[in-house]
Amino acid sequence: EVELVESGGALVQPGGSLRVSCAASGFIFSDHYMDWVRQAPGKGLEWVGRIKHKYNSYHTEYDASVRGRFIISRDDSTNSVYLQMNNLKSADTAIYYCAREHSGDDAFDAWGQGTLVAVSS
Amino acid sequence: SSELTQDPAVSVVLGQTVRITCQGDSLRSYYATWYRQKPGQAPVFVLYGKDKRPSGIPDRFSGSYSGDTTSLTIIGAQAEDEADYYCKSRDSSGNEFVFGGGTRLTVL
């Protein structure tokens, strides 16, 4: 069974940093692009960014709202993907979901349950 | 602002047909994926590609495209279909993803 489990969400002060993690199981992790999606309280879904697999040199792409502040990385040896968030702003307060990309279709075919990041003083 | 536009809310009488639309220039070049999200839950994909349904999604869900608009149609809506629906596709550059603002479907 495909499973994604996020962890590491916390309350952080504005300007601070936080790394959230996503542990994957039940599939060949190294074969898939992985994405992060966030959802602010009571709001819609927002794509954060993604990391491709080794066959595409682990290339990363980001939404303009986080580019230069957030970094996505992965460790295929531990089936994990990470989101390093720097210079956090109140607007970054959200549930952060990791998602698996369905190969070749752009679809996010598996999601974690999310981890809450709250940015407040 | 989102490059994909959805109506914020749509309602349908139980058993009737409802169409949820998503409009954006990038849809002329890229397919969309549709996600359903119920309160307190993670999203689930319900349609992808030209008109593909993942396993476990009933055949009352279908998709279509016309110009810069894609539609999710539910024929014979059920109470369990009540949820928020989001479309997702590529942005105008084709390098990044973008979600529509979401449509809250109410089944009356």
Image (cartoon, coloured by chain):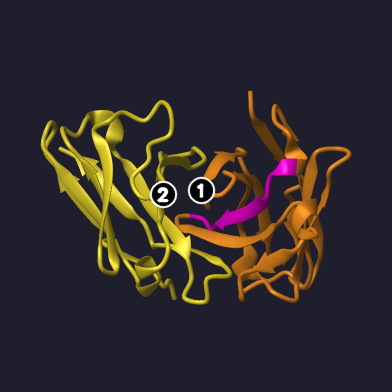
Chain colours: A orange, B yellow
Quadrant of residue B59 within the rendered picture: top left
Residue marked by disc 2: B49
Q: In this view, does A15 lie above or below A54?
A: below
Which amino acid type is marked by label 1? Answer: Ala
Quadrant of residue B3 within the rendered picture: bottom left
What is the number of the mark on residue A44? none
Q: How far apart are marks 1 and 2 (CA)?
A: 8 Å
- Protein chain holding label 1: A
Q: Is residue B86 above or below residue A121?
A: above
Relative image position of residue A24 (x, y in whole percent)? 73, 35
Q: Nearer the viewer, residue A59 or A2?
A: A59
Is residue A64 found left or right of A56 in the rendered image?
A: left
- Are the two marked residues, 1 and 2, in contact with CB atoms closer than 8 angstroms? yes
Residue marked by disc 1: A107
Q: Give the range drawn in magenta.
A: A31-41
Residue A37 belongs to the span the image colors magenta: yes
Please give the name of the residue rendered at 41% of the width and 49% of the height, measured from the top-left corner. B49
Q: Which residue lies furthest to the top in this view?
A: A1
Locate the N terminus of chain A by quadrant.
Answer: top right
Which amino acid type is marked by label 2? Answer: Gly
Please give the name of the residue rendered at 65% of the width and 49% of the height, measured from the top-left corner. A116
Q: Which residue lies furthest to the right in this view?
A: A77
On whether disc 1 and disc 2 are found on a single subunit, the reply is no
Q: Between tags 1 and 2, which lies in front?
A: 2
Please give the name of the residue rendered at 73% of the width and 69% of the height, measured from the top-left corner. A88
The 10 Å Cα crowd at callout 2, few under 14, some 14 to 19, many 20 or more, is some
Residue A66 belongs to the span the image colors magenta: no
The 10 Å Cα crowd at callout 1, few under 14, some 14 to 19, many 20 or more, is many
